[in-house]
Image: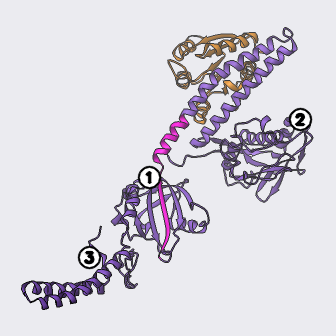
Chain colours: A purple, B orange
Amino acid sequence: MLHPFDMVKSWHLKLILGFGVIIFLPAFIISILNTNQAILWQTILIATPLAFVVFLLLLRSLKNPTVTANSKAVVATGSISSSQPAPPQPELIPSTNYLLDGVLSSIKDGIIVLDTQQRIVLANKAAEVITGYHVSEMTGKIIDNLLMMRDQSGQTVTFKSCCEIGQRNDQTVGGSLILANLIGRQDHSTQVEILVSRVTGDITSELSCLLILHDVTQERVFKQMQIDFVSMASHEFRTPITSIINYLAVLSEETKGKLKAQQLEFLSRALASAQQLSFLVDNLLNVSKIERGSISLSLHSMDWHKSLTDVFQNHRPQATAKNISLELELPPSLSPVLADDIRINEVLNNLIDNAINYTKEGGKITIGAKLSGNEVVTYVQDTGVGIPQEVIPHLFTKFFRAPGALQQSSKGTGLGLYIAKSIIDLHHGKIWVESTLGKGSTFYFTLPLADNSQMSPSIAQLNSNFN
Amino acid sequence: MPQSKRIIIIEDESFIADIYAHELTKAGFEVRIENNGVAGLQALEKEQFDLLLLDIMLPGMHGLELLRQWRIKHPNSTMPVLLLTNLGQDEVIKEAFALGAQGYLIKASYTPQQVVAEVANALQSQAKPNPPTP
């Protein structure tokens, strides 16, 4: 908290105050010593309005802290070359609202405000904890000279570039979110989510960027514990599932001819349900692997024309059973692609199963592919219920199920598209959807050509970003 | 179909070991069951087997540790080894193949009949490992 006299920033206010003290105080002393009533009243008449004026001016300065034309709101030192003129030595913005100071100190997330030259003009207590630097050590420094940031792939990212992204996305509520390792004092590293947004308001002329640093270290520890739990739980679930599948399979085979057709059908349904349960556990384990970053690919050149033809043939019985027309649309030949055959078939099977699931009887599904530059674009097109536009951004997230007329009869955990996207991302491809409600959807994904791929035909691994 | 080949199953879950033994016996194999890693390794040392079906999460000795010790003592052994487990982590699969396993079967994804088929294939080819089912 500033001394009351310091609140009066301008020199002329200080002069008036001093003038008032000089006039009033001696006059008052004289009036006390001198018993002449006339002199006393004269002193009072002169001193009182003067004191009143001084009081009004003081009151005004308390309400409206003045930053004169000669003072700057921003500290700007940085490193200055000897050939350049020395920058002005500005002053900090006075924190006249100590309620705001208290709030900033109480926020658990680090807050750093930068000026247009990327210099730190404000930092709170939490920012000190995260960076390891005291506020006084940070203030005035160009942030990229003090702190370092590495993104998920280990690449160094500058705060300047982040602020530029934040300014471009200034229409987005909440700014831009970046997940990174923040390297502070003595190379201390902290895993943070950094929310970058543009400073708005009357002071944009000097300030540019607001960084909110959210320490996610503890959250990631808990998340890792959850992932490990899912892995072990999946294993434990599989043990009784194995027994159920095994005995039902053997019973189904050994009781043929001994049970009624309906009883055999019951056994068959029980076996199918157990296998479905096993598939769901597989999905959960896949998600666990994806989140841990430990899913691996075994990449090799694939005859994509043959692969799609095989998948088409495999799904024909399923489509026919639902009276859905399944078609294949391929050019006479296709260049081989670089992919993991098991993983990419998971993607294809998921997309085609979804298409069959969400298409009514009498509908049509087309599986196709075409060359596009250095990659092959594969698509699964249906005449199903379609997907609402507002849902599409969430479609590839975990546990999301798209609403649809056939929802009640559809199966799945909401993990299929999430897993599909993760696999395609690992192949350095893209996956997306175009859809019209009531008319149908087309899911696309790309795969690199085997000849031109940047990836070597070896094990590719989705590495964890925070090791 | 292979006849009178000796298969050793090292599996601690008796429900599971019994059903595999049931199917393998039906297929004409001679089957031995051991339900912990130490006893399993001792049995491998004392007797001759034509194929090993090996679980990983075993009492006494971890399945991959058993395999490691077997390879150290018998580096020239051509006995096919099929891992039969519900562990699906990629690093475990990689380690199993690095230790010379010919196959990695996720129990929950295979019916006993399919396991018998895999055993028959492995004995016939004594070679190509089957890709694990994730």
Mark 1 vs mark 3, CA separation in Å: 42 Å
**Amino acid type, mark 1:** Thr
In the image, is residue B120 part of the stretch drawn in magenta?
A: no
Q: Residue at x 55, y 54 (%)?
A: A153
Residue at the farthest front position: A37
Mark 1 vs mark 2, CA separation in Å: 54 Å
Looking at the image, is mark 3 or mark 2 nearer the viewer?
3
| Mark before the other along the chain sequence, 3 or 2 | 3
| Chain bearing mark 3 | A
| Mark before the other along the chain sequence, 1 or 2 | 1
Q: Residue at x 31, y 75 (%)?
A: A7
Mark 3 vs mark 2, CA separation in Å: 86 Å
| Chain bearing mark 1 | A
Q: Is residue A162 visible?
A: yes
Instruction: Say whether mark 2 and mark 1 are on the same chain.
Output: yes
> Which mark identifies residue A322?
2
Placement of B17 over or under A302, stated as above or below: above
Q: Position of residue A390 (x, y in %)?
A: 72, 54
Name the residue tied to disc 1: A190
**Amino acid type, mark 3:** Phe
| Mark before the other along the chain sequence, 1 or 3 | 3
Name the residue tied to disc 3: A5
